[in-house]
Image (tube, rainbow, N blue to C red):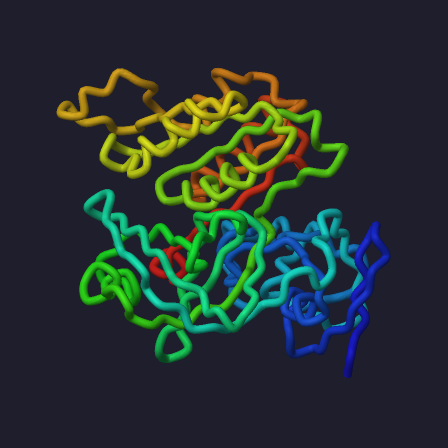
Amino acid sequence: MSLTITLQPSGRQYTAGRDETLLNAAIRAGIGLPYGCRDGACGSCKTRLVEGRVVHGAHQEKALSAAEEAAGLVLTCCAAPQTDCVLEARNVAAEGQFPVLKMPVRVLSLDKPAPDVAIVRLQLPATQNFQFHAGQYVDVLLPGNARRSYSMAVAPAHLGTPAAIELHIRHMPGGLFTDQVFGKLKEKDILRLEGPFGSFYLRDEEADRQRPIVLLASGTGFAPIKALIEQLRGLDHVRPTVLYWGCRSAADLYLHAWAEQAAAELPWLRYVPVLSEPRAEDGWSGRTGLVHEAVMADLPDLSGHQVYACGAPVMVDSAQRDFVARCGLPAEQFHADAFTSAKDKA
């Protein structure tokens, strides 16, 4: 039996079965609801249920608390409708703009700019027209129906020849895929990908263009931020933009030179690296502490800004909470992609 799902305020509708999630049904219908992990771990798809009834599958308390659920919030990635439903969804992406594809890719290169970070470039098949927004992610498909999600660190206009995407992968010892990357993966190996996924991409409508941009990254959350900078580089009129990149030590700023060069070349871009645990051997004289607190120290009034944040969930959650509550950032101007490891999800 098909149920009707209505989105407010757009009035768009799609159908869903009782055995599928609200998000999967929307993707099938070509409607881009906001989402991140698709595993009930990050909370990016949290949406208000205006009318109707849903049943939630397994999810993490930090993504949707019991109090939030009682207040009418749902996670579309793990909520299956039991009646016709009305959802409040104000950030609905363009309908059917970029299809989700499964495809083989070939390892073009594998570099390790830090001991625990690999930059993997993957050649796209010439027979498929893979389209995506800068900031979106792909899933690496693994044996046993396992998959691992990684943001693409390149803008569509920077794929090069041959066309290739770039992934930034941090080694998680014991990880099903990262052990492979840091062990036996080599050039010319074949991987299978599916994508693009995610609603983390630049909002550049006319109403947005008066807002300066804050780009906020921690660790390898720099990957989609790099893609956004590449996209902004190609725009004719670019808003003032500041990049804050937080890491533990200097070695973790694995593309520090790239960020410095970008800031030197682009008059609208400023770069502020922040270390939370600098080592004595780093000789660090720059900013220290929590990266989102560095933003608040520099920009105590964010009411006119737009923020794009990617990294560890604790950083993204803290930034969203504090920017809105303490700096006046409009909640709808905080765009985030919190990445959660398979270990964290478990």
**Residue at point 43% right, 41% down?**
314
Q: x, y percentage for residue 35?
A: 59, 55
- From the viewer's perspective, tell me whether residue 209 is left or right of residue 163: right
The residue positioned farthest toward the bottom in the image shown: 1
Could you say which is closer to the camera, residue 121 or residue 23?
121
> Where's residue 24, x and y in %?
63, 69
Horizontal side of 178 relative to 129 (left or right) equals: left
Q: Where residue 49 sits in the image (x, y, percent)?
A: 74, 56
Extreme residue toward the right, this view: 11
Query: Against 72, is 130 above or below?
Result: below
* In the image, farthest residue toward the left: 281
| Residue 154 seen in render | yes
Residue 21 lies, in percent from the top left, at 64, 70
Q: Answer left or right for 214 relative to 51.
A: left
The residue that appears at 55% across and 33% down in the rendered structure is 321
Foreground residue, 25 or 136? 136
- The quadrant of the image that shows the N terminus is bottom right
Can residue 66 be seen here? no
Q: Quadrant of the C terminus?
A: bottom left
Q: Which residue is drawn at 74% across and 52% down?
A: 89
Q: What residue do we see at 57% from left, 48% from top?
A: 200
Quadrant in which residue 12 is drawn? bottom right
Image vertical order of residue 268 relative to residue 219, above or below: above
Residue positioned most to the front: 161
In the picture provided, is 54 more to the left or to the right than 107?
A: right
Residue 17, placed above or below residue 313: below
Figure disc tally: 0
